[in-house]
Image: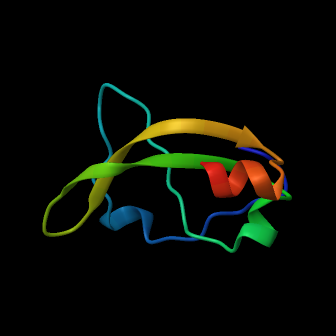
């Protein structure tokens, strides 16, 4: 995790995986995203009553607007 991002969420209510890693994301505008690292999630995911899980398609670091739109 970088020092310029502080995720705020209700962690005690989450069920985290035991044998893998977990990344928590939130949607942001393209302008804001272009100044940070961006996780591009798969459009296909797993939905249950309390959560939505998707695979990571790509990781971008301070991407240009063109990269964001493409991804």
Residue at x 37% of width, y 28% of height? 20
As drawn, 13 above or below 64:
below
Give the residue at x 46% y 38%. 56
Asked if residue 28 is positioned above or below residue 37 in the image, the reply reads below
Residue displayed at 28% across by 49% down: 44
Where is residue 34 drawn, in percent x and y? 81, 59
Q: How many marks?
A: 0
Residue 45 at x, y percent in the picture: 27, 50
Residue 36: image quadrant is bottom right
Q: Quadrant of the N terminus?
A: top right
Taking the image as shown, residue 16 lies to the left or right of residue 64, namely left
Residue visible at 64% across and 50% down in the picture: 70
The reply to whether residue 17 is in sight is yes
Q: In the orientation shown, which residue stands out farthest toward the top?
A: 19
User: Observer-nearest residue: 32 or 69?
Assistant: 69
In the rendered image, residue 25, in percent from the top left (x then y), is placed at 53, 58
Left/right of residue 71 with respect to residue 22 in the rendered view: right
């Amino acid at each position: 995790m970088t020092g310029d991002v502080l995720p705020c969420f209700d962690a005690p209510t989450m069920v985290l995986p035991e044998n893998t890693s977990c990344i928590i994301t939130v949607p942001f505008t393209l302008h804001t995203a272009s100044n940070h690292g961006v996780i591009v999630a798969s459009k296909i995911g797993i939905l249950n009553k309390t959560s939505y899980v998707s695979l990571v398609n790509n990781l971008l670091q301070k991407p240009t607007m063109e990269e964001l739109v493409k991804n």
